[in-house]
């Protein structure tokens, strides 16, 4: 996870879980809009090793970005194997 400083030198608790970090930023900046970017790609060697994947298995990379008034207040990246994973999103 990558907390992004939106103002004057704010440094959140690096040991906090993602939900807590996002809640802290929303409390500081106001209601946020969140967008998720998801893509499938082949992992690099370090990711393959960390996720214990074979050479033929792609990963999903999900980047979640929260913004307030078009200013990024929080970004988080997650990577997981595509094996056995199904994504579902409501269409509005």
Image (spheres, rainbow, N blue to C red):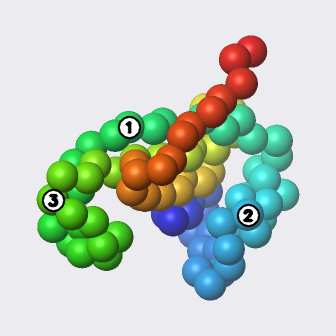
Asked if disc 3 and disc 1 are in contact, CB closer than 8 Å, the reply is no
Q: Which mark is residue 87?
A: none
Q: Residue at x 59, y 54 (%)?
A: 74
Q: Please name which of the two marks, 3 or 1, marks the residue nearer to the observer.
A: 3
From the image, tell me which residue sits under label 1: 39
First in residue order: circle 3 vs circle 1: 1
Closer to us: 67 or 38 = 38
From the image, tell me which residue sits under label 3: 55
Q: Residue at x 49, y 63 (%)?
A: 2
Q: Please name which of the two marks, 2 or 1, marks the residue nearer to the observer.
A: 1
In this view, 86 is above or below 26: above
Q: Residue at x 27, y 66 (%)?
A: 53
Residue 45 percent location from the top left of the image: 15, 67
Residue 28 percent location from the top left of the image: 79, 58
In this view, 46 is above or below 29: below
| Left or right of residue 72: residue 79 | left
Distance, label 2 to label 1, CA atoms, is 22 Å
First in residue order: circle 2 vs circle 1: 2
Q: Secondary structure at mark 3?
A: loop
Q: Secondary structure at mark 2?
A: helix
| Left or right of residue 63: residue 20 | right
Q: Which mark is residue 19?
A: 2
Q: Please name which of the two marks, 2 or 3, marks the residue nearer to the observer.
A: 3
Hey, which residue is sitting farthest front in the picture? 84
Closer to us: 20 or 80 = 80
> How many residues crowd mark 1 within 10 Å: few (<14), some (14–19), many (20+)?
few
Residue 49 percent location from the top left of the image: 24, 75
């Amino acid at each position: 996870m990558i907390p992004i400083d939106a103002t004057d030198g704010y440094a959140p608790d690096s040991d906090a879980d993602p939900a807590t970090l996002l809640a802290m930023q929303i409390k500081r900046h106001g209601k946020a809009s969140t967008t998720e970017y998801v893509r499938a790609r082949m992992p690099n060697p370090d990711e393959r090793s960390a996720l214990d994947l074979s050479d033929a298995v792609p990963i999903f990379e999900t980047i979640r970005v929260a913004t307030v008034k078009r200013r990024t207040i929080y970004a988080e990246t997650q990577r997981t194997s595509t094996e056995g994973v199904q994504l579902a999103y409501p269409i509005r």
